[in-house]
Amino acid sequence: MRFILFLLLSLSIALGLGAASARWALEQSAEIGTVRVGAWHADPLIGSVEADPYAKARLARTGNLTLGIGEGIVFRAETDSDGLRLRRTCRYRLEGALPVAQVWSLVPYAADGRLLQPGEGRPGWLLSDSLLRDESNGFTIQLGPRAAPGNWLALGGTGDFLLALTLYDTPASASSGLSDLTLPRIVRTDCLDA
Amino acid sequence: MRRVPSSALSSSDRPASATRPRLGSSVLRFLLGLALAVIIGLVGAAIVHIAVVLLVPSMADNNAWGRLSRIGPMFEIVRIEPLREGGSGPAAQATGSERQDFAFIDPAFVTVSCRFSLADGPVRLYADAETDFWSASIYSREGDNLYSINNRAAVEGLFDLLVGTPEQILEARADVDASDDTAIPVGLPVEEGYLTLRALVREESARPLVEAFTRAVVCEPAAPAAQPD
């Protein structure tokens, strides 16, 4: 009788704790293997054969189409360079340099990976080709709900958002030396509701 | 040899513990058993944890392969639309919700995909059209990236791959056919996989041309060399 009770106890600890900790790890282990550059972070091994088991299991659950190792690399930012969450009602300025890439795109998404819908005729994403540069070959990108001159990316709705910077066909996609990259700083200018 | 002393030990042990039925020893035995059960449970939890994490990729039916298989059958080119927030604008409604099953799709690209099987021979993936910039990857069913290429690395910028198992690729090379000359042979260590092909839309005015390119993409079992067309 006592033996059966102990057996049930062992089994419930093993199954309950094992399953719960696996679930917890898959939801929380997003930090394993990521490379951070300022507010930006990337997971250079995601989708590759060499990815760690947690990353593979996580990918299997979300089912995203990853970018191949040779195709490029995606950097995401949920916060500005001061560590504050990106908000759609705020205006931001992106400035600085970008690694060499044949093409890059800058896209704001909702937290669940849906595209923001800023409205008809407003730019919902930005491509390297259409970027306006100043005399010294630098650039500034403005993000915000209201139209701005120069490189402007429209935000729509309310709440948080995240920025994805995807570099296509870039030497930076080699998993070594990623942390030496320079990526643009995300500076909050002001907020409309603050 | 060993049975005799062990049975002798237990038979001499049992009356000793039975003759001293103290409260403390039974509580101690209960606590020891409890501790043992908890320790076994914790070890089991570690095993279950590892097993779950390792099994998820092969069990998950909501991975990219599973989602793609809900969009279209094997060897069919399917278009991947980005998920959009609450449908506004005509583009959001154009293709139905099934086709918008993937998050974090780059809206600056037209993305197509197809699932293929190498069970009945090698598979030809090609496009009879050209575009400005494209980038392609091949994945195993579990989502491991096996091969990537873009138009700069391809011969004359043409998208033309012959995928197969290493044996199939060797065979295809042995009886090389003039019509298949341009295809880049890709040996894969798996039987099933999927392709993703992303074609850049540099500006909205170029979108029809890019869509013409993605419509020209073909994903089909390679024709046997004996049947030229």
Image (cartoon, rainbow, N blue to C red):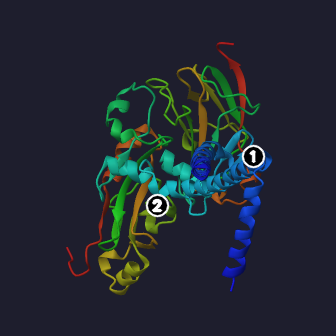
> Is residue A182 visible to the viewer in this orientation of the structure?
no
Quarter holding the C terminus of chain B? bottom left
Is residue B179 rendered to the left or right of residue A105? Answer: left
Name the residue that disc number 2 marks.
B139
Please state which of residues A13 and B148 is positioned toward the viewer in this rendering.
A13
Marked residue nearer the N-terminal end (1 or 2): 1
Whole-Å distance between the Cαs marked 1 and 2? 59 Å
Q: At which x and y percent is residue A16? A: 58, 45
Q: Which quadrant of the structure image shows residue A72?
A: bottom right
Is residue A63 rendered to the left or right of residue A187? Answer: left
Residues at discs 1 and 2 in contact (Cβ within 8 Å) = no
Q: Secondary structure at mark 1?
A: helix
Q: Relative to A73, does residue A141 appear above or below in the rendering?
A: above
Q: Residue at x 31, y 60 (%)?
A: B218
Circle 1 marks a residue in which chain?
B
Q: Residue at x 64, y 28 (%)?
A: A142
Name the residue that disc number 1 marks.
B27
Q: Are marks 1 and 2 on the same chain?
A: yes
Q: Residue at x 55, y 52 (%)?
A: A57
Q: Say what amino acid the circle numbered 2 marks.
A: Tyr
Q: Which quadrant of the structure image shows residue B121?
A: bottom left
The residue at the far top in this view is A193
